[in-house]
């Protein structure tokens, strides 16, 4: 009797992930990717981001900031992007390690001083700090979950982007 390795754990297609890992190992240049988004203003403080062929993702500000409160604002979306990236990392790395996850929840909060944004002072217009609490439900050994957590934090593209200075060029076309 032969037992075949599972093709999916936690809903992750392990063959597809292994294929990508193999392709990048075989051709390191394949690991250098460029991602794109286009944002269009839709009036007031509303805009929408278009990525690939997906429906636009709306953005707006809460009423206290003069918006219509029709969608998450950009800094909330940034927190969401970090949380989503971590969730992908937990799913991918847990699956590769054979760990079944019953639930993953990522709670995020960030501190932002509006003075610079509102033109009332100099300084940082962005987050001063971001705090993340990860809740994992799994029958895996606690040591395995700690190892999983350390791996995810050490390989998160969005986490790495936020933790270091990244050159950003904004030009008027």
Image (cartoon, rainbow, N blue to C red):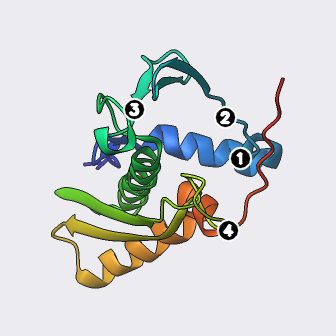
Give the residue at x 57% y 59%.
120
Which residue in the structure is indicated by mark 4? 164
Disc 2 from disc 4: Cα separation = 19 Å
Q: Which badge, 1 or 2, comes first in the chain's sequence? A: 1
Disc 3 from disc 2: Cα separation = 23 Å
Which residue in the structure is indicated by mark 3? 60
Q: Specify whether 113 is left or right of 122.
A: left
The kind of secondary structure element at disc 3 is loop
Of 60 and 88, nearer the camera is: 60
Disc 3 from disc 1: Cα separation = 38 Å
Q: Is residue 138 above or below residue 57?
A: below
x and y percentages locating residue 101 in the rendered image = 23, 58
- Which circle marks residue 24 in the picture? 1
Disc 1 from disc 2: Cα separation = 17 Å
| Nearest-to-viewer mark from 1 and 4 | 4
Q: Quadrant of residue 122?
A: bottom right
């Amino acid at each position: 009797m032969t037992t075949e390795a599972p093709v999916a754990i936690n809903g992750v297609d392990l063959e597809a992930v292994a294929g990508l890992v193999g392709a990048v190992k075989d051709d390191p240049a394949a690991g250098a990717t460029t991602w794109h988004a286009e944002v269009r203003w839709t009036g007031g403080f509303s805009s929408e981001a278009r990525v690939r062929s997906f429906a636009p993702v709306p953005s707006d500000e809460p009423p206290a900031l003069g918006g219509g409160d029709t969608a998450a604002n950009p800094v909330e979306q940034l927190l969401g992007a970090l949380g989503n990236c971590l969730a992908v990392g937990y799913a991918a790395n847990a699956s590769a390690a054979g760990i079944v996850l019953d639930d993953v929840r990522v709670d995020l909060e960030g501190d932002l001083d509006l003075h610079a944004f509102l033109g009332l002072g100099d300084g940082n217009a962005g987050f001063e700090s971001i705090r993340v609490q990860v809740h994992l439900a799994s029958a895996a050994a606690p040591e395995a979950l700690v190892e999983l957590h350390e791996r995810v934090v050490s390989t998160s593209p969005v986490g790495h982007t936020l933790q270091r200075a990244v050159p950003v060029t904004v030009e008027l076309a």
